[in-house]
Image: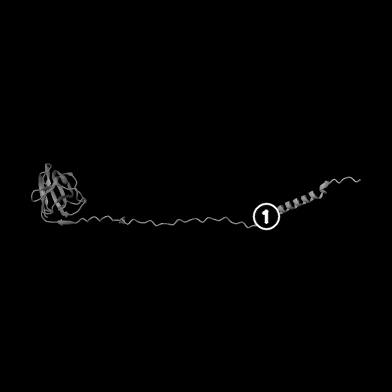
Amino acid sequence: MPPPSPSGPSGPAGPGPRRNGVRGVLIGGTLVVMVALGLLAWQLLPATPAATPTPSVAPVTPVAVPSDVPPSVARTPETPTPTTSSAVTGGSIGQHIGYRTTDGEAQVTVTKASWVDNGALAPTRGLLYLVLDVRFDSLKGAAVTGPFFTAVREPGGTRHLITVGAALADPLAMRTLSAGESNAGQIAFEVARGPVTFEVLDESLEPVASVEIPG
């Protein structure tokens, strides 16, 4: 009696496991090939450059100028009024007027007289500057001379001392003269235009010589 078959009642066991193994190998190989092809196709695709953002430009809004702002106006400085001078002659102008001093003798000469309407400072309204060119000469002894010992007197008796508002090219200096010496220069008075009397004063401010000046 022959020995029983090792396959048992289910039939031969060898062919089943071998068929299943071949199928698994085929499926795995197919997947590997597909993945490889996919990777190769990805590598071959052209690279797409990244999109460059377009810079945004803000609109420029013009600045409105307020209508209530006054326009700027450049002003040039005003030209100063030129000085006008009117010379006068006659009276005692040009004459040598002698007088006695405390310590001797001297003489005064008004060589020029002018009425001036402007100067370093404008004269008071209604008045002018009387500019006198004078010369003092000491004839004997000593003589105190200078602008502080001079004045002008109006016909009504009002006396005016020197002013500092006029522009003088050669102001008279204060000097004490010995015999043979002289002192010359300009002095000015602020007074209404008209005939006046120029006076030389002594140390007590009393008149010792007078020169008539026409208006």
Can the viewer see residue 190? yes
Q: Which of 136 and 126 is in front in this view?
A: 126
Task: Pinpoint residue 133: horizontal percent, then vertical percent.
Answer: 17, 51
SS of the residue at dot 1?
helix
Can the viewer see residue 13? no
Q: Which of 7 and 110 is in front in this view?
A: 7
In the image, 62: left or right of 24?
Answer: left
Q: Which of 76 and 3 is in front in this view?
A: 3
Q: Which of 22 and 202 is in front in this view?
A: 22
Task: Pinpoint residue 49: horizontal percent, then vertical percent.
Answer: 58, 56
Task: Pinpoint residue 161: horizontal percent, then vertical percent.
Answer: 14, 47
x 79%, y 50%: residue: 16
Relative to 145, say whether 38 is above or below: below
Q: In which quarter of the image is residue 93?
A: bottom left
Residue holding disc 1: 38
Amino acid found under the numbered disc labelled 1: Gly
In the image, 42: left or right of 166?
Answer: right
Tell me the quadrant of the picture where the C terminus can be found: bottom left
Q: How many marks?
A: 1
Tell me the quadrant of the picture where the N terminus can be found: top right
x 16%, y 57%: residue: 86
Q: Which residue lies furthest to the left in this view?
A: 156
Task: Pinpoint residue 201: horizontal percent, then vertical percent.
Answer: 12, 45
x 73%, y 52%: residue: 27
